[in-house]
């Protein structure tokens, strides 16, 4: 239906006119006064929209002309192509990174195995070195098996050491001849001259007696051990002092024995002694004797130095 004033069209649904009723209407216009029902119905749109058979005109409210839409489509296709290329590059980078990661992981695993093997070799070498050191120390000590140290005999000028050790041996009940002696000497740093008033407090160097046979050395040690209160009386001039016959030790074992004696006193051990060049300790009667070869074993079997224990106790 057209408006006579503005020539715009209306549809029946908007003006609320039933379709059957509208078919009874006639068409009027400036060029004619009447028309058939077929003419009227052919000029009317009975559904929502504009005139029948007429496409809607493009208005200013349209979102975009066809040219701009085409340009947008081209740009979107180009953008999609670029995104696809970026995805391909990302996939290539991802694959390369995965390969690098696998190679790095493999290399790290190999290096870890080599490092572990090296550490095991170092541990084995340290163990072997420790065993060799103990073996060499035992050999060095074995070379001194015929040697004895005699302590407590005052050192005097122009002393006759051969006569002194023979007389001392007789005091313990062993007959020692010149033919039994390989050598005899004082060992250690020579004591500087001091006033006679301090001679009684002076510490004399030990006498080392080298014997030709181990059996003679063992005989002297047993005899000296059985004699109590053995002194230097009738051996040298001066006030009598206690004398001792001991096995001779290497420098390392001598230091270890000195530390063992100190440590056993600190921890209440009753016995610390030397036998066949070895250091032994015993906590009390009835307890087993323990052989000490190294400072580490001394820490383990007796205890660490007291000053270290006290320092650890003071740590907050």
Image: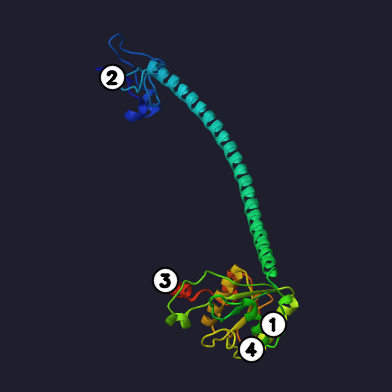
How many C-alpha atoms fall within 10 Å of the one at disc 1: few (<14), some, or many (≥20)?
A: many
N-term mark: 4 or 1:
1
N-term mark: 1 or 3:
1
Mark 2 and mark 4 in contact? Answer it, CB < 8 Å: no
Q: Secondary structure at mark 2?
A: loop
Measured along the vertical axis of the image, is residue 93 above or below residue 71? below
Pick the front one: 54 or 4 = 54
Q: Which residue is mark 4?
A: 285
Q: Which residue is mark 3?
A: 315
Between marks 2 and 4, how big is the CA–CA gap? Answer: 136 Å
N-term mark: 1 or 2:
2
Between marks 1 and 3, how big is the CA–CA gap? Answer: 51 Å
Horizontally, residue 158 falls left or right of residue 224, namely: left
Between marks 4 and 3, how big is the CA–CA gap? Answer: 36 Å
Pick the front one: 290 or 276 = 276
In which quadrant of the rendered view does residue 128 lie? bottom right
What residue occupies the far left of the structure in this picture?
5
Q: Which residue is mark 2?
A: 3
Between marks 1 and 2, how big is the CA–CA gap? Answer: 152 Å
Q: Secondary structure at mark 3?
A: loop
Q: Which residue is mark 1?
A: 220
What residue occupies the far bottom of the structure in this picture?
228
Q: Which mark is residue 106?
A: none
Residue drawn at x 60%, y 36% as measured from the top left: 99
Q: Is residue 77 visible?
A: yes
Q: Nearer the viewer, mark 1 or mark 3?
A: 1
Mark 4 and mark 3 in contact? Answer it, CB < 8 Å: no
Q: Position of residue 209 (x, y in %)?
A: 65, 75
């Amino acid at each position: 239906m057209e408006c006579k004033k503005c020539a715009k069209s209306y549809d029946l649904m908007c003006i609320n006119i039933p379709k059957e009723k509208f078919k009874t209407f006639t068409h009027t216009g400036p060029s004619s006064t009447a028309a058939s029902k077929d003419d009227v119905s052919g000029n009317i749109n009975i559904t929502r929209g504009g005139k029948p058979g007429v496409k809607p005109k493009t208005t200013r409210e349209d979102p975009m002309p066809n040219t701009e839409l085409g340009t947008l489509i081209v740009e979107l296709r180009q953008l999609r192509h670029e995104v696809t290329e970026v995805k391909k590059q990302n996939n290539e980078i991802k694959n390369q990174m995965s390969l690098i990661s696998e190679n790095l992981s493999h290399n790290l695993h190999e290096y870890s195995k080599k490092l572990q093997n090296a550490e095991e070799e170092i541990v084995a070498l340290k163990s072997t070195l420790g065993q060799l050191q103990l073996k060499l120390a035992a050999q060095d000590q074995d070379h001194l098996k015929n040697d004895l140290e005699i302590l407590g005999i005052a050192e005097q000028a122009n002393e006759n050491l051969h006569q002194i050790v023979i007389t001392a041996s007789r005091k313990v009940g062993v007959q020692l001849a010149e033919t039994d002696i390989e050598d005899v000497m004082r060992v250690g740093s020579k004591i500087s001259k001091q006033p006679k008033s301090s001679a009684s407090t002076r510490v004399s160097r030990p006498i080392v007696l080298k014997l030709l046979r181990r059996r003679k050395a063992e005989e002297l040690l047993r005899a000296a051990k059985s004699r109590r209160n053995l002194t230097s009386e009738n051996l040298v001039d001066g006030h009598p002092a206690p004398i001792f016959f001991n096995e001779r030790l290497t420098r390392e074992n001598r230091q270890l024995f000195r530390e063992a004696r100190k440590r056993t006193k600190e921890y209440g051990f009753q016995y610390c002694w030397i036998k066949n060049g070895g250091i032994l300790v015993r906590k009390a009667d009835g307890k087993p004797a323990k052989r000490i070869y190294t400072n580490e074993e001394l820490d383990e079997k007796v205890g660490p130095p007291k000053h270290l224990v006290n320092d650890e106790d003071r740590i907050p």
